[in-house]
Image (tube, rainbow, N blue to C red):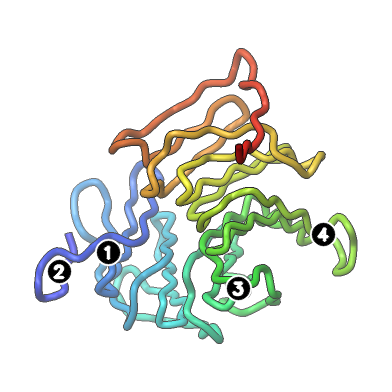
Amino acid sequence: EADDGDGTSEVTALAFDGDHVASGHACGAVFLRNTSRTLMRASHEGVVTGVHWEGGATAFSASADRRLAQWDVRTGSRVAALQAKRPILCMDVCEGYAALGLDDGSVCVCSLSPLRLLFSFKAHDSPVSAARLVTVSQLVTSCAGGGVALWRLDEEEGSERRLTRFDGHTAPVVCVDGDAEKVVSGARDGTVRVWDISLGRLRFMLQGFTPYIGSVQLSSSWLMADGTNNAVVMMDFSNGEPAEEEDDDD
């Protein structure tokens, strides 16, 4: 638990690999733990919106204070920091690279070793609410306006293949995931939608979730999501995916 002086602070970012836990909190605290004890506590000046630690000597965290920080796990000291132009709302890491979603709709892509900005671009017209680096060249983002986008970072700017947008959600999209064939998104409209990358359109939609959905996880044959009356739901499609559903406003 983290304490901000008035009580237990809300957990706002979490990473777990089976042996190591990194957590970030609304009070700005960052904790690193193994299965038996706390190894490090550090602090940001704002809400922590992303954490990354693989059990080694270095950890990373992002915050609404605009900083992507690199921490020395042994001493708890900040050894490097990258300051974004706007508050960081989300972070994802893949193979030594980080994608940061900002509150002005921009995305920053950084290297972690050394810690430096590689490039940035305007992804959405509203705050970036979620980011998922599926591979170092495939990035999925979403926004508070309900949009979802797939970015092929290895394609040149201006290429038709660089960007595919998926529209249909009617509320902020708060979580995304993807693989080589599909993108999944969960939103405050109570739906989880799975999009076909090659066709650029909805493959199927799942309804009945509450506005409090917070995460989705996808594999080739199953989909896991929360936000259904305090339950975690796992859907197994190994015997075939459900029939495609379409929005019906009538």
Report crowding for label 2: few under 14, some 14 to 19, many 20 or more residues within 10 A (C-alpha): some
Which of the two discs, 2 and 4, sits closer to the camera? 4
Question: Contact (CB < 8 A) between labels 4 and 1?
Answer: no
Q: Earlier in the sequence, mark 3 or mark 4?
A: 3
Judged from the image, the secondary structure of the residue bearing numbered disc 3 is loop
Which of the two discs, 4 and 1, sits closer to the camera? 4
Residue at image point 89% right, 58% down: 160
Judged from the image, the secondary structure of the residue bearing numbered disc 1 is strand
Percent x, y for residue 198?
81, 40
Q: Earlier in the sequence, mark 2 or mark 4?
A: 2
Q: Quadrant of residue 6?
A: bottom left
Circle 3 is placed at which residue position?
Answer: 105
Q: Earlier in the sequence, mark 3 or mark 1?
A: 1
Circle 4 is placed at which residue position?
Answer: 162
Q: Quadrant of residue 56?
A: bottom left
> Mark 4: which amino acid?
Arg
Name the outermost residue toward the right.
Answer: 159
> Mark 3: which amino acid?
Gly
Question: Contact (CB < 8 A) between labels 2 and 4?
Answer: no
Circle 1 is placed at which residue position?
Answer: 31
Which of the two discs, 2 and 3, sits closer to the camera? 3
Report crowding for label 1: few under 14, some 14 to 19, many 20 or more residues within 10 A (C-alpha): many
Cα–Cα span, label 3 and label 4 = 17 Å
Cα–Cα span, label 2 and label 3 = 31 Å
Residue at image point 36% right, 55% down: 14
Cα–Cα span, label 2 and label 1 = 11 Å
Question: Contact (CB < 8 A) between labels 3 and 1?
Answer: no
